[in-house]
Amino acid sequence: MITYRKERILKEEYVSFLKRTDLGSQYPKERFDERIERLLKNAQISITARNEKGLLVGAILGITDFAYWLFVTDLGVDRAYTKKGIGKALMQMAHNLAGGADDIILYTCANENAVGFYEKFGMSMAEDVMALNRVEWTPFTV
């Protein structure tokens, strides 16, 4: 049985979770520990999925204005728990928490391996998003 709830995740638990997901390769190496802690502290949306033993098996983090948009910064599911609807449930809960489908546009930067999931959820590639990226980015896997 999977339980879902709004909660802050501690850095140590999240890093352990990242190692069990495909999210572990989406972050730059530069100042990882400091930046991941800031992400967890400041995400406006933070919802977890836990198994019956309390193990973190899914998580979604996002930022929102609660009026027009939600940007999903992180969505991950433990590899042992994929294809069980956890990602979809987390997306729906985050969307509802931000204000619901009638008011809130969802955005995310999707890893190429996750595009199929987001398309199944009903999302499509956006043509109206601008970016400025001067961030030093050394790939690594957590």
Image (cartoon, rainbow, N blue to C red):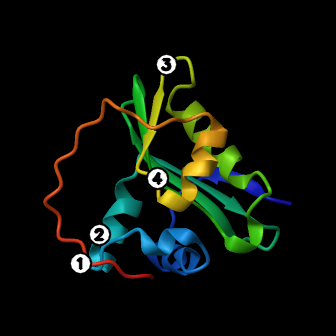
Which amino acid lies under the numbered mark 2 shown in the image of this protein? Arg
Check the picture and name the quadrant holding the C terminus: bottom left
Residue at the spot 36% in from the left edge and 61% down from the top edge:
39
Residue where numbered disc 3 is placed: 103
Does 133 sit left or right of 6 as displayed? left
> Circle 2 sits in a helix, a strand or a loop, which is it?
helix
> Circle 1 sits in a helix, a strand or a loop, which is it?
loop
Q: Are marks 2 and 1 in contact (CB under 8 Å)?
A: yes
Spatial CA span between label 4 and label 2: 19 Å
Residue where numbered disc 1 is placed: 30
The nearer-to-camera label among 1 and 4 is 4
Spatial CA span between label 3 and label 4: 22 Å
Residue where numbered disc 2 is placed: 35
Disc on res. 139: none
Count residues near mark 4 (Cα–Cα under 10 Å), then give few for <14, some for 14-19, many for 20+: some
Residue where numbered disc 4 is placed: 110
